[in-house]
Image: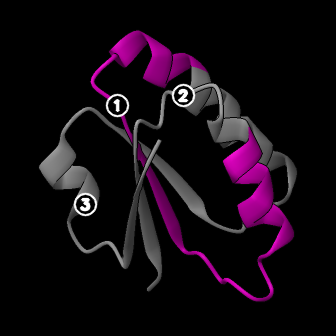
Amino acid sequence: MLKVAVIGGGSTYTPELINGFLERGGSFPLDKLCLMDIDQERLNVVGGFAKRMVESKGSPFEVVLSADQRQAIEGASYVITQ
């Protein structure tokens, strides 16, 4: 399973990141994307938009929202910050 954790997932740059993952599904077969942020309100807004973006493309990977950094990075193949 390929999991990516994004620390700072409530960033306004997250939709662009999501778009990149969606466009590269053939070469980067992501299973789970965990968006983590300490600002719950921003995480809910941006994360909700990210989930809708992924759903509109047939849900090729799962989007999980978390305010818990340890939970977000558990089992991650890659951890990125923004």
Q: Relative to residue 47, is residue 5 drawn left or right?
A: left
Q: Which residue is mark 2?
A: 11
Q: Residue at x 54, y 28 (%)?
A: 11
> What element does badge 2 sit on?
loop
Q: Is residue 34 magenta?
A: yes
Q: Is residue 33 magenta?
A: yes
Q: Toward the viewer: 31 or 8? A: 8
Judge left or right: residue 1 versus residue 26. left
Q: CA distance from mark 2 to mark 1?
A: 8 Å
Give whichever of discs 3 and 2 has the lower sequence position: 2
The residue wearing badge 3 is 73
Mark 3 surroundings: few (<14), some (14-19) or many (≥20) residues within 10 A:
many
x, y percent for residue 46: 59, 25
Give the distance between the C-alpha atoms of the residues marked 3 and 2, in whole angstroms: 17 Å
Q: The disc labelled 1 sits on which kind of residue? A: Asp
Q: Which residues are magenta?
A: 16-45
Res. 80 image quadrant? bottom left
Q: Residue at x 86, y 67 (%)?
A: 23
Q: In the rendered view, tell whether residue 14 sits above or below residue 71.
A: above
- Amino acid at circle 3: Ile
- What's the image's color scheme? one colour
Q: Residue at x 40, y 72 (%)?
A: 78
- The image quadrant that residue 48 belongs to is top right
Select label 3 or label 2 by which is in front. 2
Residue that label 1 marks: 37
Image location (x, y in percent) of residue 1: 44, 86
Does the residue at mark 2 contact the one at mark 1 (Cβ under 8 Å)?
A: yes
Q: Earlier in the sequence, mark 2 or mark 1?
A: 2
